[in-house]
Amino acid sequence: MIQAVKVSLEVLNDRLDPYDHLEEILDKINRWEPKVNAYAYVENMGKLKEDLGRQLKRKGRLSGVIVAVKDNISTSWMPTTAASRMLSGYIPPYNATVIEKLLYEGAVIIGKTNMDEFAMGSTSENTPYGPVHNPWCLDCTAGGSSGGSGAVLAYGGADLALGSDTGGSVRLPAAYTGTVALKPTYGTVSRYGLIPYANSLEQISPMARTVKDLALLYNTIKGDDPRDSTTLGVEQEYPIDRVDPGKTRIAVIRELMDGVDEGILKIFWNTISLLESHGFTIDMVSIKSLRYSLPAYYVIAMAEASSNLARYDGVIHGNRVKECRGYWDCAAKARGEYFGVEVKTRILMGAYVLMEGYSREYYVKATKLRRLIRDSLAKLFKDYQAIISPVSPILPPKLGEKLEDPVKMYTMDVMTVTANLAGIPALVQPAGIISGFPIGIQWMGPVFSESRLFGLASIVEDEVGVITPLQ
Amino acid sequence: MARKVTIGLEIHVQITGAKTKLFCNCPVDYRDKPPNTNVCPVCMGFPGALPVVNRKAIELAVTASKSLNCEIPEWLIFTRKHYFYPDLPKNYQITQYKTVAGAPVCLGGRLDYIDPKDWSIHSVGLDRINIEEDPGKAVYEKGGIIGSRVVLVDYNRSGVGLLEIVTRPELHDARQARIAVENLLLTLWYLGITDPRLPGAFRVDANISVEGGGGRVELKNIGSLIEVERGLRYEILRQTKIVDAGGKIARETRHWDTVKGVSKATRSKEEETDYMYFPDPDLPPLRVTRSMLVKAEAALEFTPLKLWSDMNRYGIDKGLAWSIIRELDLAKTFRTALSIYRNPHLIAWMLGNVVKGLRDKKGLEYVPPAVDIAYLAELLDRNIVHREMVKFVILPKAMETKESVKRIMEYEGKLPRGDALEKAVEKVLIEESKAVNDLLRGRKQAFNYLIGRVMRKLDGKGDPREIAEILRRKLNGLI
Ligand SMILES: [Zn+2]
């Protein structure tokens, strides 16, 4: 399948018929969706052709490119439900900033991808649309919470996809579906229009099949936004760096290597050898504070979630129940009825860690740990230019398996949450295949080091090759 | 029996001077707009819409804090305060809070206020000032949230910036509390922070306890200065009666019913709400910059207390001074007029006695411009007009017709009309050719001599500045 970076040029030079390209993608959707269930909503053919015609005229760098968007990113003409029954039927009155940027560059938004409700989950099973199946293994999870976006890319149901990453939500799906994803430096991509789960941790994140496509999408959506006070006011491009192995020291963190599946380890060490053969220096180092990443992450994420989700009471936001009396009864019943179990669990835990008398023990302590983690990584990056690690300790679980044990599900995020706590960029790419499963590796670097991560990932990609879309 | 009363106030003041709401671009002027037309995704709390701080509102809050002698932190931190209520679109309010890593715009501080009874100056300590957003306005079918099947909410007000000013419990009677609030509002009005005349621009909650009563009562929903005194008087009397009869006061929240003039318990027991405070992750800490502080400092040049001490220094009668200070437009006119013509007594008399009197008696709101007031002061000084003329003819006409004082003087025959002036000047130029020649040769004194001649021709009625202007014009800029 053609790379997204080539689409607009090929269309311009009459070497690619954009309508054929659209139909090829729709064919794949028709073929795969009944099995995979990665889309929550697909725009109808007539509207898509109309959009394509209009977007081709823009002659932007994404003209003719078909993009799938996670269902928690606001689109003013398509439903945006964050996979929650609370928001079923909701069409936002405005576009997210990233959507405006995509449209400006000529992209066609094909539909909204399935996900864990309000991005809470690591398997894309907490969803009223039914679980996302992994195209590589149909009874396995595709990871989460942006599992739909990963799966769509894996089977060729879009050229590019947007996800959101709060604690690994694009990286776990990328690892499980053999695609690439970047959790950008916090504050480089506007969150305006992203239905919030945990504001201080999450970023809208690009997903693709190749590093070049990933860089293209990231460079399209990044940038300062006066509507988001947490964007950093940095205006720069992030091209793919040519990395000099002689000047690049890479760290392997001992704390991120615990309890990793043997197959995953095998691919990981193969990648290390490969990098060493390129001349990179790779050391094993220890950062003790990373042991606290997971609890610190969950305390902060749940505190923010419980606050963000307070607005859904059926008055302005969220659906209403028919039978209720008075404001509090109606609000309670709506929340009882329309939130899923995982969401309710996190709201309650979040309220708990913020309660007077507890917040010092939990929330405040977690923010202190977060600072500690951020500082120790900053220190590490004085000596090392990047960190390499596995993405998940385990292969994609079977559907249903992880739902039984929430704590097990939370530990799937152990390697990814650190980047969110520290606000640093993290890139995941496939590094090989073991017994039919793609295996991902993760790169992390200091803030604003996206170009370097693209460069490092390109070296691995040149050796391993691009493994999606699946035939 | 007289018992010691302790009162602390919580005054919410809308930052109407900020022009737009605290975190979005909707105007603060929501009054008279159809319900829910002054809103956007941000102030309606739509999922994914994000707050962006209104710099002007922050500058004004810093100015308020400076004027109230506060300690202002280097970094301001906004906090989410959670409670479920239909008028709160996000079910949390963005505010500021002392603990859990919060930092309000003002800690400590002191409000100095003038008591017009004896012109003494008092102080009440401040606990803090928070910057926060106003909720929407809920209208209940049955007057209250409990028991009403239907609630109508208008979010036009939602997101308007508020200053929540919390005093220490250092006030001891109802009148004093009212005067403190009046002085506070006056200061904020002078500083361009709020317009207290707008309906709903401020609300007061009061904590009241009576010696021997035990608990303190929070009295809510006081919307005007008169109600501050009325409500507090009622509540003090109510508590005193209970304590005198041997009863105890339960800690509770009561609602001030303006119409019936009574306070009513809202809940039988005060519920301890847990607001789950934590810093708003959508709003990074905001630095109080040097330029904000410099701007604030500059604004403090014009405050009621400053004007009060100036007027005292000029020896202006205190009652007269206060009647000017209480009304911002009179105070501003006083300041400007004084900068044009330096006779504070005449200017104060015109504004505080004549203009204020006409405003109170006849409801005339218009204030003649400062240049006209200064001009009249000069004419009074030169005995071209006398006080009775100003008080009973010129100023009433000026306020009724909004005509310039000069035009009114012309109509009243107190000033020659424009053509008469011109003619007098022409005549003098012909008669006084020697003086004209002297002038052209550079003898500056000749100019004043010519003006004097024209004045004499007009029986002293002319305006010397205007005559000078005509002279210059006639001499074609030769001088
Ligand atoms: Zn607004």
Image (cartoon, coloured by chain):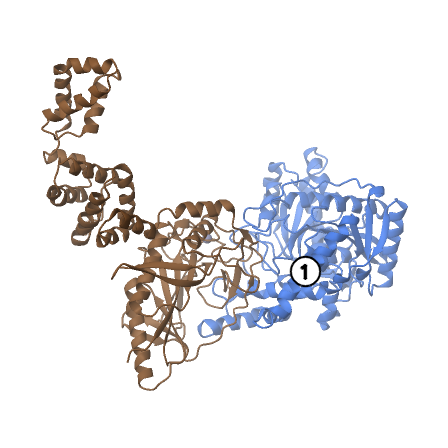
Chain colours: A blue, B brown
Q: Is residue B429 above or below residue B245?
A: above
Question: What secondary structure is marked by label 1?
Answer: helix
Q: Nearer the viewer, residue A149 or B171?
A: B171
Callout 1, which amino acid?
Arg
Q: Quadrant of residue B461?
A: top left
Q: Residues within 10 Å of mark 1 (few under 14, many from 20)?
A: many
Residue A170 in view: no
The answer to whether residue A360 is left or right of residue B296 is right
Q: The N terminus of chain B is located in which quarter?
A: bottom left
The answer to whether residue A81 is left or right of residue B225 is right
Q: Is residue B365 above or below residue B462?
A: below
Q: Quadrant of residue A65?
A: top right
Question: x, y (%) of residue B439?
Answer: 22, 16
Residue B116 in view: yes
Question: x, y (%) of residue B348?
Answer: 22, 46
Q: Nearer the viewer, residue A354 or A410?
A: A354
The answer to whether residue A2 is left or right of residue B271 is right
Residue visible at 73% across and 67% down in the picture: A409
Q: Nearer the viewer, residue A111 or A162?
A: A162
The answer to whether residue B419 is left or right of residue A221 is left
Question: x, y (%) of residue A163?
Answer: 67, 54
Q: Which residue is mark 1?
A: A370
In this rendering, the count of numbered labels is 1
Question: x, y (%) of residue B331?
Answer: 28, 48
